[in-house]
Amino acid sequence: MGRRKSTNTTPTSTNSSNNFEGANIRFRDADDKEIASNSSNLDDSIVAVDKASEDVSMGEPDVSFFGCDGEDDKTSADYYFDSYSHFGIHEEMLKDAVRTKTYQNVIYRNKFLFQNKIVLDVGAGTGILSLFCAKAGAAHVYAVECSHMADMAKQIVETNGLSDVVTVLKGKIEEIELPVAKVDIIISEWMGYFLLFENMLNTVLYARDKWLVDDGVVLPDEASLYLTAIEDAEYKDDKIEFWNNVYGFDMSCIKKQAMMEPLVDTVDQKQIVTNCHLLKTMDISKMVPGDASFTAPFKLIAERDDYIHAFVAYFDVSFTKCHKLMGFSTGPRSRATHWKQTVLYLEDVLTICEGEAIIGSMTVAPNKKNPRDVDIMVKYSLSGRRCVVSRVQFYKMR
Ligand SMILES: C[S@@+](CC[C@H](N)C(=O)[O-])C[C@H]1O[C@@H](n2cnc3c(N)ncnc32)[C@H](O)[C@@H]1O
């Protein structure tokens, strides 16, 4: 089985890399040779830093380097608490062609939805969706963005000559005043890892209830969460059993934490052992915030004899108000997106025979202390020829 690539969800929220390799991915992919060469590079870099500080102390500091041009006075602390202020995360999202092209196609191929309509773009980022809507003939687009990226979005709108159609408003949806009482369309890309991580869905629902006209349209208007089960011996070993012996030391106390944190990762479709079960469909145009907390039963039937090491969750989104139904899937059988899939490792390795079923339920709720995080409880049992097991496991997306 080829290695998968993992992303940890802290602190940079929803969007991290898939085929767009982030720092931790390169690190994990490094083999022993690279680690060895890295450590010798480290010595060189220390010398280089020492030399550099000598050079600085000998002359006057270059004043312009310390931000006197006033263009960018943000520090890593700003980015830690507000990762969306940095262009990197937007680059990743924009380069996710499955995501961005789907939105573009939805808007450009369904101009009838947008022509002469007032649109609200919830969490506009660089303003890309607002620009699409303006090009599709919207009467006016309000692009609301709470991070400092709003300043860039304003410039982007101006540079592209769309200031008369797109107004960028910097602030939180929950705190901002819109210059209009009602809007015809709400568009947003709010989906997090495991669909619900980051809890931006509530912001969309807030905007819908406050500003959307009665027969208004929310795009996308449907999101579904699915569950399947995979064989993942090699990778579970690498991520979980690794802690048993780290350079000769027992660090197995970390295993418990590692087990509790779902891994955001791409799964090879060959690893799938069971059917995929639809857990929950959310109708964004009608649901209430409480609907994002739920318990859903599942039945996963083995399609071959194999071992099962993990459950895998993923989601689809749909735009049902288009001429033709449009949308995309983040599942392991579809083209990879930056959301990858969410892997939940099992305490036991299950031995399953074709036709046998894992029966259980998944409970999902925002964390009480930090509603951006998601608490997950999975109850499951297998009563098979080779394996009888019944368990409850808890996970935290954070
Ligand atoms: C997933 S990004 C999508 C950005 C852009 N729409 C796109 O498709 O590339 C979500 C954006 O929503 C912004 N955001 C999150 N919560 C918000 C809120 N309550 N009010 C305004 N903006 C918010 C974030 O800062 C982020 O830039």
Image (cartoon, rainbow, N blue to C red):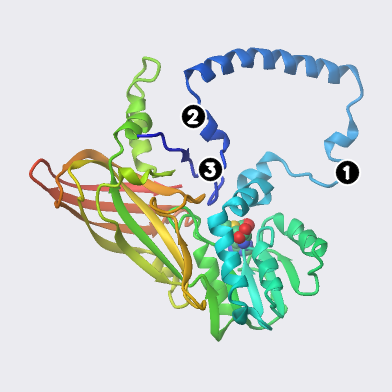
Q: How packed is label 2: few (under 14 Cα within 10 Å), some, or many (20 or more)? A: few
| Count of marks overlaid on the render | 3
Q: Secondary structure at mark 2?
A: helix
Residue 270 numbered mark, or none: none
- Of the residues tagged 1 and 3, which is closer to the observer? 3
Residue 19 numbered mark, or none: 3
Work out whether mark 1 precedes mark 3 in sequence or the reverse, and give the earlier one. 3
User: Quadrant location of the N terminus?
Assistant: top left
Residue at figure coordinates x 33%, y 34% from the top left: 236
Instruction: Residue at the far bottom: name it.
Output: 214
| Spot occupied by residue 319 in the image (x, y as percentages of width and height) | 49, 71
| Spot occupied by residue 112 in the image (x, y as percentages of width and height) | 61, 82
Relative to 280, residue 230 above or below? above
Which of 199 and 17 lies nearest the eye of the viewer? Answer: 17
Amino acid on which disc 2 is placed: Asp
Q: Secondary structure at mark 1?
A: loop
Residue at figure coordinates x 79%, y 45% from the top left: 72
Work out whether mark 3 precedes mark 2 in sequence or the reverse, and give the earlier one. 3
Can you identify the residue that label 2 sits on?
29
| Spot occupied by residue 282 in the image (x, y as percentages of width and height) | 40, 69
Q: Judge whether residue 210 can be spotted in this image.
A: yes
Specify the quarter for ligand 1: bottom right
Relative to 230, residue 132 above or below? below
Can you identify the residue that label 1 sits on?
69
Amino acid on which disc 1 is placed: Asp
Residue at figure coordinates x 77%, y 60% from the top left: 156
Tell me the CA gap for discs 3 and 2. Answer: 13 Å
- Of the residues tagged 2 and 1, which is closer to the observer? 2
Which of 304 and 298 lies nearest the eye of the viewer? Answer: 304
Q: Is 339 left or right of 47, judged from the image as shown?
A: left
Amino acid on which disc 3 is placed: Asn
